[in-house]
Image (spheres, rainbow, N blue to C red):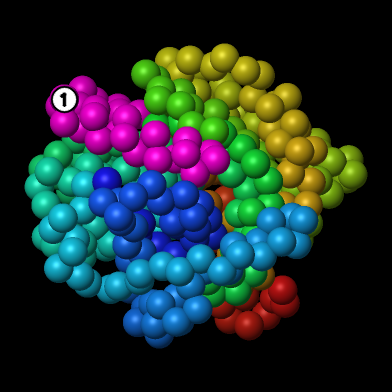
Amino acid sequence: MHIAIVGPGAIGCLFASLLSLKKQSNKDSLLLLDHNRERADLLNRQGIIYETDRKQRTMVPVSAEIKSLALKQVDVVLFCVKSHDLQSCLQFYLPLLSPQALLVFLQNGIGHLDIQEQLNLPTTPAFASSSEGATLLAPGHVLHAGRGRSHLGFLQSPTALQQQQLQELAQHFHRAGLEISLSQDIRSQLWAKLFINAGINPLTALYNRTNGQLLTSCAARGRLKNIVREAEAVARACGITINVDPLQATLAVCKSTAKNISSMLQDRRNRRSTEIDAINGAVAREGKRLGIATPFNDEVVEQIKKMESEYNSGTITK
């Protein structure tokens, strides 16, 4: 299978490393796509440094490109860019791909679930949710900070070819050592991940704390509870199936990934735009549509946006 991963961020580098290390044959290939030429050149020179929490490091050779004729031969494209970059990224790469390529979207939140309608995509996309812990320590240097589980599935009926492509991708993930499952209700899996992201990400960024440190603060823990319970109320009103108590699941992730630096805290420390609109912002928008008050989610959205404006103006430190 020929796989392309768009976006050499934390999760993109993590998946690229694991898939490259367990490549089955010369018939398999992996291409890492990056809009940044300088970073792509760095990845081609040094590969990806894959590090585990046991401080074991492996240099993983990868092929990184901005554009490539090889894209026409790609079977699956996994988009690992931030939610706010997805639309422009798709508009750039879609004309270069085969119409038969399966597009798989792995973004935080739920702001991207209507991407097919937004861009009138010519094919039915797949969606992924993953709780793998990944921290980008430097360009091309990823820390696998915690093991998790990943889910793949379709929101709409796929063709037989698309179903086969997703099954083969799942097999590659499994051989790479990832816990993976094909979901018949990927929307519920995406909401389950949203509960966790909504509770953890903005608070770690606002308090500048790791996941586990949220549990040591009564104020942070109380806010987390209220944020997640609001999101749960909105999800139930949307008809989302909830199999596991969202608050207990979020607290469990805080504990199991205690040392992890959330993606939003990584964004704060690197002075980047966050995915707040796709996470807590999406909860607030759905709540407003359904007539459900979400004051705790509204509050963190406002605070994160203020924080972004402050560090963009240079008035906030890491």
Judge whether residue 95 can be spotted in this image: yes
Number of numbered discs on residues? 1
Looking at the picture, how far across and down is residue 159, in whole percent? 15, 27
Residue 266, quarter of picture: bottom right
Looking at the picture, how far across and down is residue 51, in whole percent? 65, 61
Boundaries of the magenta span: 153-178
Residue 126 is inside the magenta segment: no
Q: Residue shown at 32%/62% (left/top)?
A: 31
Looking at the picture, how far across and down is residue 143, in whole percent? 65, 60
* Amino acid type of the residue tagged 1 in the rendering: Ala
Q: Is residue 31 left or right of residue 246?
A: left
Residue 162 is inside the magenta segment: yes
| Number of other residues with Cα within 10 Å of mark 1, as a class: few under 14, some 14 to 19, many 20 or more | few
For this orientation, the residue located farthest to the front is 25
Q: Is the magenta region chiefly helix, strand or loop?
A: helix
Residue 152 drawn above or below residue 273:
above
Judge whether residue 306 can be spotted in this image: no
Q: Residue shown at 75%/32% (left/top)?
A: 251
Q: Residue shown at 33%/66% (left/top)?
A: 33
Give the residue at mark 1.
160
Secondary structure under the numbered disc 1 in the rendered image: helix
Residue 282 drawn above or below residue 242:
below
Front residue of 270 and 146? 146
Q: Residue shown at 44%/56% (left/top)?
A: 20
Q: Is residue 77 left or right of residue 230?
A: left
Looking at the picture, how far across and down is residue 107, in whole percent? 43, 47
Residue 11 drawn above or below residue 267:
above
Front residue of 17 and 12? 17
Q: Is residue 191 left or right of residue 97?
A: right
